[in-house]
Image (tube, rainbow, N blue to C red):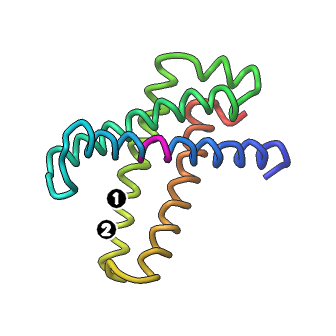
Amino acid sequence: MNKDNLKEFLRYVIIGGISALIDMGVNYLTLYYIFHATKDDKLPVAISVTAGFIVGLVVNYILSNVFVFRKPEQKEKGKTVGAFLIYAAVGVIGYFLTVGLTLLGTRFIGEEGIWYLIMTAVVKGIVLVWNYLGRKIFVYRGK
Protein backbone atom coordinates (compact mmCIF):
# COMPACT_ATOMS: atom_id res chain seq x y z
CA MET A 1 0.00 0.00 0.00
CA ASN A 2 1.51 3.30 -1.04
CA LYS A 3 1.51 6.45 1.09
CA ASP A 4 -1.54 8.01 -0.64
CA ASN A 5 -3.62 4.84 -0.24
CA LEU A 6 -2.60 4.56 3.42
CA LYS A 7 -3.70 8.16 4.07
CA GLU A 8 -6.96 7.50 2.22
CA PHE A 9 -7.56 4.34 4.29
CA LEU A 10 -6.86 6.20 7.55
CA ARG A 11 -9.34 8.91 6.53
CA TYR A 12 -11.83 6.12 5.79
CA VAL A 13 -11.28 4.66 9.27
CA ILE A 14 -12.01 8.05 10.87
CA ILE A 15 -15.13 8.59 8.75
CA GLY A 16 -16.21 5.02 9.55
CA GLY A 17 -15.88 5.75 13.25
CA ILE A 18 -17.96 8.91 12.96
CA SER A 19 -20.57 7.04 10.95
CA ALA A 20 -20.66 4.20 13.47
CA LEU A 21 -21.26 6.67 16.32
CA ILE A 22 -24.11 8.25 14.35
CA ASP A 23 -25.52 4.78 13.58
CA MET A 24 -25.47 3.87 17.27
CA GLY A 25 -26.94 7.23 18.28
CA VAL A 26 -29.85 6.97 15.85
CA ASN A 27 -30.43 3.37 16.94
CA TYR A 28 -30.51 4.38 20.61
CA LEU A 29 -32.69 7.46 20.10
CA THR A 30 -35.14 5.57 17.89
CA LEU A 31 -35.47 2.66 20.29
CA TYR A 32 -35.73 4.54 23.58
CA TYR A 33 -37.12 7.96 22.66
CA ILE A 34 -39.28 7.40 19.59
CA PHE A 35 -40.62 3.92 20.37
CA HIS A 36 -40.18 4.12 24.16
CA ALA A 37 -39.22 0.44 23.90
CA THR A 38 -36.58 -1.80 25.45
CA LYS A 39 -34.00 -4.12 23.99
CA ASP A 40 -36.46 -6.98 24.50
CA ASP A 41 -39.07 -5.50 22.10
CA LYS A 42 -38.12 -7.31 18.89
CA LEU A 43 -39.86 -5.19 16.22
CA PRO A 44 -38.77 -1.80 17.62
CA VAL A 45 -35.22 -3.15 17.96
CA ALA A 46 -35.22 -4.28 14.32
CA ILE A 47 -36.58 -0.93 13.15
CA SER A 48 -34.16 1.11 15.27
CA VAL A 49 -31.17 -0.95 14.11
CA THR A 50 -32.28 -0.48 10.50
CA ALA A 51 -32.78 3.27 10.98
CA GLY A 52 -29.31 3.58 12.49
CA PHE A 53 -27.77 1.55 9.68
CA ILE A 54 -29.42 3.67 6.97
CA VAL A 55 -28.53 7.02 8.54
CA GLY A 56 -24.97 5.82 9.24
CA LEU A 57 -24.64 4.60 5.65
CA VAL A 58 -25.80 7.92 4.18
CA VAL A 59 -23.48 9.88 6.47
CA ASN A 60 -20.60 7.57 5.56
CA TYR A 61 -21.31 8.02 1.85
CA ILE A 62 -21.45 11.82 2.07
CA LEU A 63 -18.36 12.15 4.27
CA SER A 64 -16.41 9.64 2.18
CA ASN A 65 -17.16 11.63 -0.96
CA VAL A 66 -15.99 14.83 0.73
CA PHE A 67 -13.04 13.69 2.86
CA VAL A 68 -11.86 10.21 1.80
CA PHE A 69 -12.07 9.72 -1.95
CA ARG A 70 -10.82 13.18 -2.90
CA LYS A 71 -9.25 12.73 -6.32
CA PRO A 72 -11.26 14.49 -9.05
CA GLU A 73 -12.02 11.26 -10.92
CA GLN A 74 -13.17 9.62 -7.66
CA LYS A 75 -15.41 12.57 -6.82
CA GLU A 76 -16.97 12.39 -10.27
CA LYS A 77 -17.62 8.65 -10.03
CA GLY A 78 -18.95 8.90 -6.48
CA LYS A 79 -21.72 11.43 -6.98
CA THR A 80 -24.27 9.43 -8.98
CA VAL A 81 -27.34 7.52 -7.82
CA GLY A 82 -25.78 4.34 -9.22
CA ALA A 83 -22.63 4.96 -7.17
CA PHE A 84 -24.71 5.35 -4.02
CA LEU A 85 -26.59 2.12 -4.75
CA ILE A 86 -23.32 0.23 -5.19
CA TYR A 87 -21.94 1.92 -2.07
CA ALA A 88 -25.03 0.77 -0.17
CA ALA A 89 -24.77 -2.77 -1.58
CA VAL A 90 -21.18 -3.04 -0.35
CA GLY A 91 -22.40 -1.87 3.08
CA VAL A 92 -25.22 -4.42 3.13
CA ILE A 93 -22.76 -7.18 2.24
CA GLY A 94 -20.56 -5.89 5.08
CA TYR A 95 -23.54 -6.05 7.42
CA PHE A 96 -24.23 -9.68 6.49
CA LEU A 97 -20.53 -10.50 6.81
CA THR A 98 -20.64 -9.05 10.33
CA VAL A 99 -23.66 -11.13 11.28
CA GLY A 100 -22.37 -14.31 9.65
CA LEU A 101 -18.82 -14.11 11.01
CA THR A 102 -20.12 -13.19 14.48
CA LEU A 103 -22.51 -16.15 14.51
CA LEU A 104 -19.74 -18.43 13.27
CA GLY A 105 -17.33 -17.09 15.88
CA THR A 106 -19.78 -17.50 18.75
CA ARG A 107 -20.39 -21.09 17.67
CA PHE A 108 -16.73 -21.86 18.30
CA ILE A 109 -15.77 -19.55 21.19
CA GLY A 110 -19.05 -18.73 22.90
CA GLU A 111 -20.70 -15.42 23.71
CA GLU A 112 -18.83 -14.38 26.83
CA GLY A 113 -15.48 -13.14 27.98
CA ILE A 114 -12.41 -11.68 26.40
CA TRP A 115 -12.43 -14.10 23.45
CA TYR A 116 -15.81 -12.79 22.34
CA LEU A 117 -14.47 -9.22 22.42
CA ILE A 118 -11.38 -10.26 20.48
CA MET A 119 -13.52 -12.12 17.94
CA THR A 120 -15.85 -9.13 17.43
CA ALA A 121 -12.83 -6.82 16.99
CA VAL A 122 -11.41 -9.18 14.34
CA VAL A 123 -14.80 -9.27 12.58
CA LYS A 124 -14.98 -5.45 12.64
CA GLY A 125 -11.51 -5.31 11.11
CA ILE A 126 -12.40 -7.76 8.34
CA VAL A 127 -15.58 -5.85 7.51
CA LEU A 128 -13.77 -2.50 7.61
CA VAL A 129 -11.29 -3.76 5.01
CA TRP A 130 -14.13 -5.26 2.91
CA ASN A 131 -16.09 -1.99 2.98
CA TYR A 132 -13.06 0.11 2.06
CA LEU A 133 -11.83 -2.15 -0.74
CA GLY A 134 -15.33 -2.91 -2.04
CA ARG A 135 -16.17 0.76 -2.28
CA LYS A 136 -12.80 1.74 -3.69
CA ILE A 137 -12.98 -0.96 -6.37
CA PHE A 138 -16.67 -0.95 -7.25
CA VAL A 139 -17.56 2.72 -6.75
CA TYR A 140 -14.33 4.65 -7.20
CA ARG A 141 -12.71 2.17 -9.62
CA GLY A 142 -9.55 1.58 -7.57
CA LYS A 143 -7.92 4.86 -8.47
The one of 10 and 85 positioned closer to us in this rendering: 10
Judge whether 34 appears above or below 66 on screen: below
The image position of residue 90, as x and y in percent, is: 46, 40
Callout 1: helix, strand or loop?
helix
Residue range of the region highlighted in magenta in the rendering: 20-24
The image position of residue 34, as x and y in percent, is: 24, 36
In the displayed structure image, the side of residue 6 where residue 76 appears, left or right: left
Q: Which of the numbered marks, if any, corresponds to residue 99?
A: 1
In the displayed structure image, the side of residue 58 where residue 110 appears, left or right: left
Cβ atoms at labels 2 and 1 below 8 Å apart: yes
The image position of residue 2, as x and y in percent, is: 83, 49
Which residue is tagged 2?
Answer: 103
Q: Residue at x 27, y 40 (%)?
A: 33
Callout 2: helix, strand or loop?
helix
Q: Residue at x 41, y 33 (%)?
A: 55
In the displayed structure image, the side of residue 108 where residue 129 appears, left or right: right
**Please, what is the dominant secondary structure of the magenta stretch?**
helix
In the displayed structure image, the side of residue 53 where residue 141 appears, left or right: right
Judge whether 57 appears above or below 6 on screen: above
| Residue 141 inside the magenta-drawn segment | no
User: What type is the residue that disc 1 sits on?
Assistant: Val
Q: Which of the numbered marks, if any, corresponds to residue 39?
A: none
**Quarter of the image where one finds residue 44:** top left
- Label 1 crowd (10 A; few <14 / some 14-19 / many >=20): few
- Label 2 crowd (10 A; few <14 / some 14-19 / many >=20): few
Q: Residue at x 45, y 82 (%)?
A: 115
Q: CA distance from mark 2 to mark 1?
A: 6 Å
User: What type is the residue that disc 2 sits on?
Assistant: Leu
Q: Residue at x 47, y 20 (%)?
A: 82
Name the image quarter holding the C terminus. Answer: top right
